[in-house]
Amino acid sequence: MKQGIHPKYEMATIKCACGAVYTVGSTAKNVHVGICAACHPFFTGKQKYLDTAGRVEKFKKRYSAPPAPPSKKALKKAADKAAAKAAQKAASKPAPRPAPKAAAKAAPKPETPTA
């Protein structure tokens, strides 16, 4: 093993949000975790509600409020834009073509026997 390139391996303290403390070997000195074997639902059989930093409230706040109605200025701007688009479309539209003349019907070709 090459000397001087590896981090120092020492005893570290792992602290969980539930209050459990573990001592293990690691290159990190202290580690804080949100869930451990003492409080994980798989090991305890109990469902635990975790709301980290109010994410549920943030979601409800963002999507529960009805959208604000558009302002008069925004409505006028949209109407002006639609009118300008319609005028541009009418100006760029080519003149209508005249109807095609009725073509003379061609006589049917005689059938040739196939071998």
Image (tube, rainbow, N blue to C red):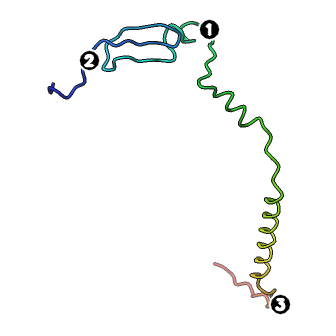
Q: Name the residue under label 1.
A: 46
Q: Residue flagged by tag 2: what amino acid is it?
A: Tyr
The x, y position of residue 4, in whole percent, is: 16, 27
Gap in angstroms between the C-alphas marked 2 and 3: 89 Å
Q: Is residue 25 left or right of residue 49?
A: left
Q: Mark 2 points at which residue?
A: 9
Mark 1 touches mark 2? (CB < 8 Å):
no
Q: What element carries label 1?
A: loop
| Among numbered discs 1 and 2, the one appearing first in the sequence | 2
Quarter of the image where one finds residue 31: top left
How many angstroms separate mark 3 from mark 1 (CA)?
80 Å
Using the image, determine if residue 82 lies above or below residue 74: below
Residue 112's image quarter? bottom right
Numbered tag placed on residue 27 in the rendering: none
Could you tell which of marks 3 and 1 lies nearer the N-terminus?
1
Give the left or right position of residue 56, taking residue 12 as reference: right
| Residue shown at 81% from the left, 53% from the top | 70
- Badge 2 crowding class, 10 Å Cα cut-off, few under 14, some 14 to 19, many 20 or more, is few
What's the residue at 33%, 20% (across, down)? 28
**Does label 2 or label 3 sit earlier along the sequence?**
2
How packed mark 1 is, by other alpha carbons closer than 10 Å (few <14, some 14-19, many 20 or more), is few
Residue type at tag 3: Pro
Which kind of residue does numbered mark 1 sit on?
A: Lys
Q: Is residue 19 left or right of residue 24?
A: right
